[in-house]
Amino acid sequence: MTRIAVGRADIAAVEVLDEFSAPVSEGQVRLAVGVFGMSANNISYAMTGEFLGYWAHFPVDEERGCVPVWGFADVVESRHPDIEVGERIFGYLPMATELVVQPDAVTDLAFSDSIEHRSTLHPWYRRLYRCATDPAHAADAEGLQATVWALFMTGWAIADDLADSVRTVVVSSASSKTSLSLAWAMSQLGVDVEVIGLTSASNIGFVAGADIYDSVRVYDDLSLSDLQGPVAYVDVAGNAGMKERVHAALGDRLTDSLIVGGTHRGGDRATGRLIGPDPRFFFIPDVAENAADGHAGFHARFAAALGEFSPWIAELIELDQATGVAAVVATYEELLTSRPGPNRSKVLSW
């Protein structure tokens, strides 16, 4: 087994570990990790690993862990009566060639990993989907699914959350897949809500070309006086200084402020003085698990929306595919210091 160990305190400290495979006990299965996506979202997992508990999922030792990825795996060994060798699985996996899990709450759609050190972690991350019966799975588009699944679910759920409460949504990092997902999902709801995308000057061509925002503004020119309230600000960039500027520019028209992620390392200097509503953390695992129609209903609605969104986003992005341990390490290290253009996404395999 190969694992990519990353320092918890220093996420630029990377080491390739070649180790003996863990044994499979009664009731467990071994997954061989296959295709997975890697983006700024995975860097966010590493950056916030201590604060949000991401390092607890796939620890290496007290000082290192495997960065989580979203992707596919095959069951290559099974000692569980309901899980067969050869099954294709999708879910939250380590940056490693394999993983031993202990299936629990097995249904036709999915099962949860209840192995001891993950059994108390958030159920959304522990659920693994069985591709043969998962309506969100498209066998001919696994690279795209690995790239957009979690990000689309977040943007789609934010649109649903805000649709009936505001007149305008301002979203940062407008070139990101989460922000594009929000704008696309809002356009499908048939509500009178404008979505304004904030982006860098270098990405404005791509964002405008997506033709999904009602208006696109650059960060250096926050002319927001024309926006109608009530307004919600969705902070996908994770830039505290920018958030202060947006709050100040919107004034009393701003009625809601959501923190979603952190696509920017560093960012504008913050003063600590934030005008307007206190930001609330939009945590998609909690939203998905607490849906009024339950997990099955939520997932069915999400799968239908993803099936409509995927052809649209596929026209905007190209998948950069690479194979091998060296390629995985190189991609991770590249994402630490730079970002691929917004029209490109990284899809990796061992």
Image: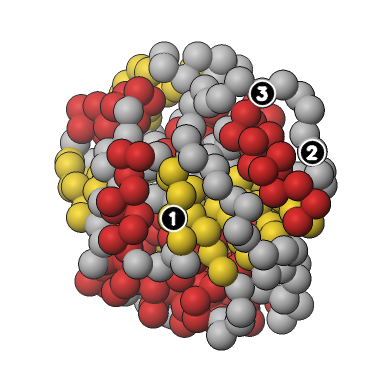
Q: Amino acid at mark 3?
A: Ala
| Distance Cα–Cα, label 2 vs label 1 | 23 Å
Q: Residues within 10 Å of mark 3 (few under 14, many from 20)?
A: some
Q: Quadrant of the C terminus?
A: top left
Q: Residues within 10 Å of mark 2 (few under 14, many from 20)?
A: some
Q: Amino acid at mark 1?
A: Val
Give residue 321's position: percent from left, percent from top: 18, 47
Seen from the viewer's position, the closer of residues 13 and 306 is 306
- With 220 as the anchor, is 125 left or right in this view? right
**Rendered view: 6 above or below 328:** above
| Distance Cα–Cα, label 1 vs label 3 | 24 Å
- On residue 270, the disc is 3
Mark 3 or mark 2, whichever is nearer to me: 2
Sooner in the amino-acid sequence: mark 3 or mark 2: 3
Q: Which residue is at a point 27% across and 32% down the rendered structure image?
A: 331
Give residue 42's position: percent from left, percent from top: 45, 39
For disc 1, the marked residue is 216
Q: Amino acid at mark 2?
A: Ile
Q: Quadrant of residue 146?
A: bottom left
Q: Which residue is at a point 32% across and 28% down the rendered structure image?
A: 338
Sooner in the amino-acid sequence: mark 2 or mark 1: 1
Secondary structure of the residue carrying tag 1 is strand
Secondary structure of the residue carrying tag 2 is loop
Seen from the viewer's position, the closer of residues 183 and 252 is 252
For disc 2, the marked residue is 275
Seen from the viewer's position, the closer of residues 262 and 275 is 275
Q: Residue furthest front?
A: 226
